[in-house]
Image (cartoon, grey):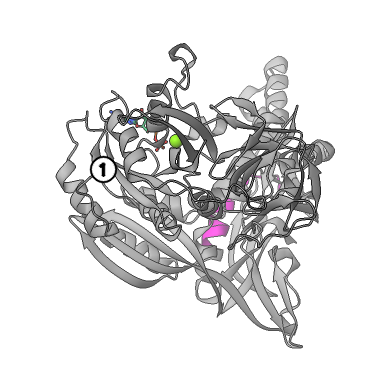
Amino acid sequence: TDLSHIRNFSIVAHIDHGKSTLADRLIQETGTVQDRDMKAQLLDSMDIERERGITIKANTVRIEYKANDGENYVLNLIDTPGHVDFAYEVSRSMRAVEGSLLVVDSTQGVEAQTLANVYHAIEADHELVPVLNKIDLPASDLDRVAEQIEDVIGIDASGAIAVSAKTGQGIRETLEAIVTRLPSPKGNPDGTLKAMLVDSWYDAYLGVIVLVRVIDGRLKKGDRIKFLSNGTTHHVDRVGVFRPEMEPFDSLGPGEIGFLTASIKQVRDTRVGDTITHDKKEVEALPGFKPAQPVVFCGLFPVDNAEFEDLRDAIEKLALNDASFSFEMETSAALGFGFRCGFLGLLHLEVIRDRIEREYDIELITTSPSVIYHVYGRDGSMIELHNPADMPDPATIDHIEEPRIKATILVPDEYLGDVLKLCQDRRGVQQDLTYAGSRAMVVYDLPLNEVVFDFYDRLKSVTKGYASFDYQMIGYQTDRLVKMSVLVNDEPVDALSTMVHTDRAEQRGRAMCEKLKDLIPRHMFKIPIQAAIGGRVIARETLSAMRKDVTAKCYGGDATRKKKLLEKQKAGKKKMRQFGKVDIPQEAFISALKMD
Ligand code: GDP
Ligand code: MG
């Protein structure tokens, strides 16, 4: 296809504003998929994505469209991930296309993720076409939302298209706008091959599938290609496009988006944002490439120690398909063998943990999520601390730095006070506060460690779900941070240690001891629960001893009922771990860290 008849685009939207539904309608309207094969949200492939209504991996589809000018166009849609954890992937896939549909739910208006994603699009020099969706709903308010787009985002919304992705209204206009308002790609068909690695994932039959955008030259089946980031070379055994099923092609030219396979075994060997060229050829690397960096770490331990090898197997398999997930073996005095894992953010952590529990049927204990601290020694050395348990002797430490983020929160006026209080409680520093209609936009500089745990949940709950949130990393800053340990029955439980700010240590320690007191069942003896910094106890609770044998009290002499009860207790025990003489239930590890 010649360049003037190609349009490459993505759809940017806040979650639930209708990105997937709109993509489905575009696919359907152009007859890319027969009606009988149409199922809702065609591009959201993974189960978890579908359940949680989020798109995690970028997906793509090639659509053929005969426009009103009588010409046939190829439209390539890249569906970008819609969550803050995947900002780098979003920015890369934006670089692979020339324009975006900016979808805003006309009953809701602009939200934090609309903003975050539109900034990626603007940074990538996109032409933007505003699409006001859900006009079939009575609450739809086109004028208000168009005005908001102009005020908050600062782009012209006079040409916004009114759409219902549900009923199909406005879909033709959207297709026409893609052809007439978005630019065609540029590229040199006779130049040296230069392509961008947009995404990659593992397929059990084909090995790693690589999504590419060709910039110059041609990528052909049989070519020998090279990845610039690591210099590895591969023999291309297939190229093709997605419609959205894979369809083989002989080659892909400039401006085209499609896939290649080359018997690559690990997704780890393919880096999003990398530049691909022919072996023995030289091209300049595409700007902005960086390997994915995990920012949140936690320990994953099997509840049942005997499942350690199964866990290793599960983690290795998942890592094959996820270059941004890191892991290494970890031993904990309390929890035995497990893995220290790194994630792009909390959602990423939850997705991986869910998949291990669900797809591999392994029950897990997740330790407190931690960010990476920079710990500077008195001798001038610096270590990256991923695990509070590895904290060096405080006497050797000069100072500690922690990562901070810039958080953007959009919230209706009436909840603003609660949001400011929440951010203030989390050691936030307000940067900006502006209004757009009856909504406030607040920007805070916050420590990441105050956000990784339950900030998002708290934000949702204080605003009844009306706030939206997005963040980006801004860098490291020194603060007064210490390691707080927890002792149960005088034994330190390493999996419960956390890094805290000195000013908040006591409050945190007290809250944690109170929680644990409720979460740990009574035993035959008294159990002290303490929080300590170094050797100094800063909070303490005592769990009193159980008075009588439960079975004796409730069931007297009935032997069968007594046996049943004991069996039940045994089953319950499986979810517990023993620390010294004390059983601690699995949920204690997460619940104890939640702050109310
Ligand atoms: P995404 O998170 O942006 O991909 O949003 P989805 O496409 O999954 O849509 C979120 C919800 O809004 C789903 O329940 C859709 O059925 C619904 N939805 C999407 N577009 C429309 C529309 O035009 N009208 C109505 N009434 N509902 C819509
Ligand atoms: Mg979606």
* Residue appearing at x 73%, y 20% in the figure: 563
Extreme residue toward the front, this view: 190
Secondary structure category for the residue under label 1: loop
Vertical order, 381 against 47 (above or below):
below
Local crowd size for mark 1, using a 10 Å CA cut-off: few (<14), some (14–19), many (≥20) = some
Residue, x 78% and y 40% (percent of image)? Answer: 264
Residue found at the very far top of the displayed protein: 36
Quadrant of the snapshot with the C terminus? bottom left
Q: Position of residue 381 (x, y in %)?
A: 75, 82
Q: Which residues are magenta?
A: 510-526
The answer, for residue 549, to whether it is visible in the render is no
Residue at 44 percent across and 71 percent down: it is: 427
**Residue 98 in picture, x, y percent from top left:** 44, 49
Name the outermost residue toward the left: 143
Q: Name which residue lies at 41% across and 67% down.
A: 425
Q: Which amino acid type is shown beneath numbered disc 1? A: Gln
Q: Nearer the viewer, residue 546 or 307?
A: 307
Q: Nearer the viewer, residue 503 or 278?
A: 278
Assess whether residue 101 is covered by the magenta stretch.
no
- Position of 361 with respect to 506 (left or right) is right
Per the image, the residue denoted by label 1 is 108
Position of residue 423 relative to residue 197, above or below, is below
**Is residue 10 left or right of 235 when viewed as pictured?**
left
585 left or right of 129 in image? right
Instruction: Specify whether 333 is left or right of 437.
Output: right
Residue nearest the observer in this picture, 287 or 81: 287
Corner quadrant of residue 19: top left
Q: Position of residue 459 (x, y in %)?
A: 38, 53
Does 151 sit above or below residue 65?
below
Residue 520 in magenta stretch = yes
Q: Quadrant of ligand 2?
A: top left
